Image (tube, rainbow, N blue to C red):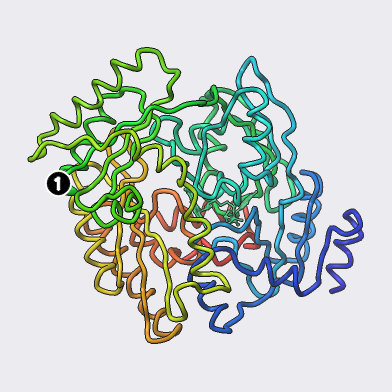
Amino acid sequence: MTNLTELADRLAAGAVVTDPATRRERAIDSWSLALLRRAAGDEPPLPDAVIFPRSTDDVAIALAWASETRTAVIPRGAGSGVCGGAQAAAGSVVLDLSLMNRVTSVDTVSRVVAVEAGTRGDRLEGVLAEHDLTVGHYPQSVAISTVGGWIAASSAGQASAGFGAIEDVVLGLTAVTPRGEILRCRPVPRSAAGPDLRRLLVGSEGTLAVVTEAVLACRPRVRDWVWLARQFPSFPALADGLRAVVQADLGAVVIRGYDEADAQLSFGALGHSAGCAGIVGFPAHVPGLTERTALAAQAMSRAGSSPPPADLGPGYGEHWWAHRNDAVQTYAAIMGPDRAFGSGVVVDTVEVAGLWSVVPRLYDGVRTALASHAETVLCHLSHLHSAGSSLYFTFLIRGDDDHDAAARYRAAWEQAVRSCADAGGTMTHHHGVGRLKTPFLPVELGATGTAVLARIRAALDPDGIMNPEVLRP
Ligand SMILES: Cc1cc2nc3c(=O)[nH]c(=O)nc-3n(C[C@H](O)[C@H](O)[C@H](O)COP(=O)(O)OP(=O)(O)OC[C@H]3O[C@@H](n4cnc5c(N)ncnc54)[C@H](O)[C@@H]3O)c2cc1C
């Protein structure tokens, strides 16, 4: 407490908060196992305090203090992370960036925006809309997540096929090292000045530095979309059809492919009853739109599915766009205090990725692994790249009670990660590692990779104060 008083003296009044409600609210993020445990009455340790900086200098003061006092620091954006990356540890302080939420400038000549790291996506997009611009980074959680969280968790938005993932739009950033030094990476379109320090912080999950400001690339706002949708007879046919579209390089911005079970859930309201569904979206303003859509349709038809893909019309894309963020409410209803599906139920998502040549094996392996523990398993191709794709599995486990559900959940994850590694994929495309996947890091990176990561970390954070239970197996 004496230490906290010292910190409070160095910051503005009200920046250090110790009331139990604030500490409890920020003790966990949106990891389903933590939510399940909380629902079962199993409370995680509360942080000693929550610190609300208002500037990069405040963050530097807080980290210098933490370094002097060897206090663990858990950086936090909006707490929408689903892997326990922002879960507090006993004796830690949470550094909550939510008051650093200013959009500081918009450069319409370069089409870039400078923004503080605690800014949520909906607010950022609201300001950019006044300039007819967008960052184009649209995670489902856009309204409940922050720019700093996107960078730290290596996020990908739903328009990543055209607009890229977060690493593609970060042009510059300011961060504070664990010792309280301010690192400024100036905004430039590209730089060859040594290894890219901006990239070092993408996916660092609060273990290397605290991101306080960023400069992000923007592009013209999409006012209207033109959608194609096709029904495929099987998952391999779906994957082939959408691979043909992404590899044809036609400028599609949204490309998504649903297996039969996920298609029924996602498009049941439209009467979808059988087969897989692929949707492709183009901004209506792109030049040569008619030719592009015709070529995309041809690419899907020529991909060799038998029977050939059937046209589902533009309604599927329109429906998807209108409901693209509904999962936020659904997830909160099931895993939050309402427990809409009752106790003993846990839902989560596994977002693996691999080259196209291993996508069919990944699909079969991870799906089978999850299905041995889960009542329901759905999958869609969520982020498509020229060389491969992310496979986004949603699963629901129903246990005898919450403890049984938690045990099954652990077993499902363990088996899914192993089968992903066997197929040559990565266990995470965009949700990051957090506490959930930290034990599996050696499976993913190997012994040398894990050791290299540990050495980078030790160089930047010799006292080991930054998010100590994450990315350190
Ligand atoms: C329903 C739902 C849907 C989702 N959909 C998507 C999606 O479509 N795409 C996607 O990529 N993710 C998605 N997510 C996951 C989540 O929204 C992202 O991981 C997001 O980037 C987290 O941002 P946040 O601000 O909430 O970060 P937090 O959850 O607060 O933190 C995430 C991690 O980053 C660290 N961190 C946060 N801010 C900083 C900072 N300024 N400096 C250093 N470290 C920091 C934390 O310590 C933690 O390790 C979804 C989550 C939910 C609940």
The reply, left or right, for residue 339 in relation to residue 301 is right
Q: Which residue in the structure is indicated by mark 1?
A: 233
Image coordinates for residue 451, horizontal then vertical, percent: 44, 57
Where in the figure is residue 438, as x and y percent of width and height?
Answer: 45, 64
Judging depth in this view, the residue of 162 and 224 nearest the camera is 224
Residue name at image x 66 percent, y 75 percent: 90
Q: Does 344 appear above or below 347?
A: below
In the picture as drawn, the residue positioned furthest to the left comes out as 306
Q: Is residue 88 left or right of residue 226?
A: right
Quadrant of residue 444 in the image? bottom left
Q: Quadrant of residue 405?
A: bottom left
Residue 233 at x, y = what percent?
A: 14, 46
- Residue 377: percent from the left, percent from the top? 29, 63
Asked whether the viewer can see residue 471, the reply is no
How packed is label 1: few (under 14 Cα within 10 Å), some, or many (20 or more)? many
* Amino acid at dot 1: Pro
Residue 461 visible somewhere in the drawing = yes
Q: Is residue 466 above or below residue 212?
A: below
Q: Nearer the viewer, residue 180 or 306?
A: 306
- Give the residue drawn at x 27%, y 50%: 272
Residue pictured at 63% horizontal, 59% vertical: 466
Along the line of sight, which residue is nearer the eye, 273 or 280? 273
How many badges with numbers are in the image?
1
Q: Is residue 170 left or right of residue 366?
A: right
Q: Nearer the viewer, residue 370 or 48?
A: 370
- State the SS at label 1: loop
